[in-house]
């Protein structure tokens, strides 16, 4: 079975702190894709990143970085120097060939609160 | 610009009524999906379609149905609304894994 676990239900940090959101996944597929989405208080879902199972390079985009480690089945998301605008719910998702080529399995989300 | 729109944004209905939530996309995506979002559960897949006349059940499909008569639309019907179906519903479309899902803005449904 495919599964995504985001064990951190809610995290609170003070502005400018670094914060890491954890994502652990389970799949038997050799080819799969991992995603992160952001849901700000306004409610829309915003795509942040996609990573395929053959690309273990870490990704950095501005203050955001992602650490993909197949050995531990993790795809963690770090925000450096957090800002109040980063306050949102963040979802990790998995899509593999077993679950259907284009279906995503989502984690339960991590609510990040960045305090001024 | 291409977009994906959901309507209505908010809906209050009574138990037992049939309700249809609309999803319309102009991305020309073959793949369309319906999810519901509930606290503590994240997003759970209700139904999905990979093309015209193709529909498939997701993990929480009981009480819901969809039909795909064209590329642009995937309406979600609640056959007989129940209080357990009070939720926020998201429609999404994609052309594969390259860019991930594009989500609609969501429909907040309350069943009283």
Image: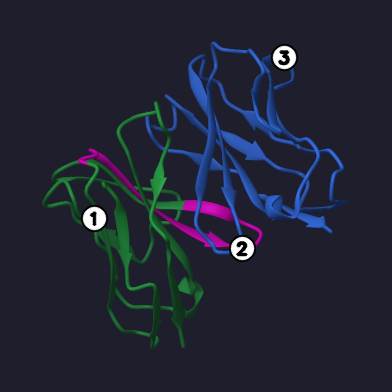
Q: Residues within 10 Å of mark 2 (few under 14, many from 20)?
A: few
Residue B59 position (above or below residue B94):
below
**Disc 3 sits on a residue from what chain?**
A
Q: CA distance from mark 3 to mark 1?
A: 39 Å
Residue bearing the label numbered 1 = B74
Task: Choose between B81 and A113: the one closer to the eye.
Answer: A113
Q: Residue at x 41, y 37 (%)?
A: A103
Nearer to us: label 3 or label 2: 2
Where is residue B55 drawn, in percent x and y? 24, 47
Residue A39 position (above or below residue B82):
above
Task: Choose between A86 and B73: the one closer to the eye.
Answer: A86
Badge 3 vs badge 1, beta-carbon distance below 8 Å: no
Task: Choose between B82 and A86: the one closer to the eye.
Answer: A86
In the image, which residues are magenta?
Answer: B28-44
Magenta highlight: main SS? strand
Residue bearing the label numbered 2 = A41
Nearer to us: label 1 or label 2: 2
Residue bearing the label numbered 3 = A71
Q: Residue at x 39, y 72 (%)?
A: B9
Badge 3 vs badge 2, beta-carbon distance below 8 Å: no
Q: Residues within 10 Å of mark 1 (few under 14, many from 20)?
A: many
Shade representing chain A: blue
Q: CA distance from mark 1 to mark 2?
A: 26 Å
């Amino acid at each position: 079975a495919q599964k995504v676990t985001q064990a951190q239900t809610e995290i609170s940090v003070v502005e400018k702190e670094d914060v890491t959101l954890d994502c652990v996944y389970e799949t038997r597929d050799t080819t799969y894709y991992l995603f992160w989405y952001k849901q700000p208080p306004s409610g829309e879902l915003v795509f942040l990143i996609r990573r395929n199972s053959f690309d273990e390079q870490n990704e950095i985009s501005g203050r955001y970085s992602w650490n993909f480690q197949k050995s531990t089945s993790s795809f963690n998301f770090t925000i450096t120097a957090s800002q109040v605008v980063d306050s949102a719910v963040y979802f990790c998702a998995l899509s593999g060939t077993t679950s259907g080529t284009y279906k995503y399995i989502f984690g339960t989300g991590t609510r990040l609160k960045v305090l001024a | 610009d291409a977009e994906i729109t959901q309507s209505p944004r908010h809906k209050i209905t009574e138990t037992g009524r049939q309700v249809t939530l609309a999803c319309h996309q102009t991305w020309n995506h073959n793949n369309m999906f319906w999810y519901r979002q509930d606290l503590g559960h994240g997003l759970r897949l209700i139904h999905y379609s990979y093309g015209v006349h193709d529909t498939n059940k997701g993990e929480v499909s009981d009480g819901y149905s969809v039909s795909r008569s064209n590329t642009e639309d995937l309406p979600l019907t609640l056959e007989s609304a129940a209080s357990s179906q009070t939720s926020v519903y998201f429609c999404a479309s994609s052309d594969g894994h390259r860019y991930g899902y594009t989500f609609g803005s969501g429909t907040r449904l309350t069943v009283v």
